[in-house]
Image: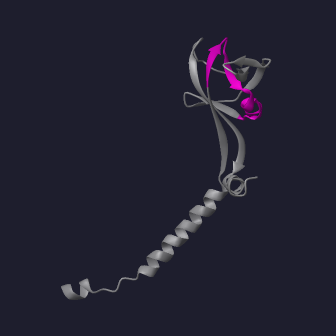
Amino acid sequence: MNCDELIHIKYHVYHIFIILVLIAIFISIYMLRVEVYDVYNAIGSIKSHCLVLNVPIEHSDTIQNGEYLIINDEKYEYEIKNISAILLSNNVSYQEVVLAFENDIPENSIVDTKIYYDKEKVATKLKELIYGG
């Protein structure tokens, strides 16, 4: 082969296009089967080896239906130890929620908490976003 033959080799773009389309289809199918959680972020404090959160009334069910929480990149299972009556501060109604879990976090620490709840497949979440239901 000389240089002119190498330069004029027919390049079949449709093969690459078909491969890219198939890869996109397989990734889409995989992503629709993946299950994801909704996440509620909160800041709380550690008191007597329990996490104390001030949660707005709109999110109190979120805490009760949560599956686990993450503090400092560590996953913890929790149970609700106490929920206070409705309190009012700066015209915002909230409840103080005490969560018991196994931890070794120092007392009186302020921690950033992520509570994972409402596990659903991506396909279901997309359907809810599209159809609003």
Q: Position of residue 111 (x, y in %)?
A: 57, 22
Labels in figure, total:
0
> Is residue 114 visible in this depiction of the protein?
yes
Query: Is residue 57 on the magenta stretch?
Result: yes
Q: Residue farthest to the right?
A: 85
Q: Quadrant of residue 4?
A: bottom left
**Residue 59 location, quadrant:** top right
Q: Residue furthest left?
A: 3
Residue 101 appears in the rendering: no
At which x and y percent is residue 13? 41, 80
Q: Residue at x 57, y 62 (%)?
A: 27
Instruction: Identify which residue, 83 or 85, lies in the foreground.
Output: 85
Residue 9 at x, y percent in the picture:
30, 86
Provide residue 84's location: percent of width, then percent of height.
78, 17
Going by the image, does 65 lie left or right of 11?
A: right
Instruction: State the residue at coordinates (68%, 21%).
Output: 54
Residue 51: in magenta span:
yes
Q: In the picture shown, does residue 114 fall above or below 3?
A: above
First to last magenta residue range: 43-67
Task: State how the image is colored.
Answer: one colour
- At x 61%, y 57%, the residue is 31
Q: Is residue 110 above or below residue 68?
A: above
Query: What residue is shown at x 76% (from left), y 23% (from top)?
Result: 80
Q: Quadrant of residue 12?
A: bottom left
Q: Nearer the viewer, residue 31 or 5?
A: 31
- In which quadrant is the N terminus drawn? bottom left
Q: Nearer the viewer, residue 1 or 48?
A: 48
Asked if residue 62 is positioned above or below residue 44 in the image, the reply reads below
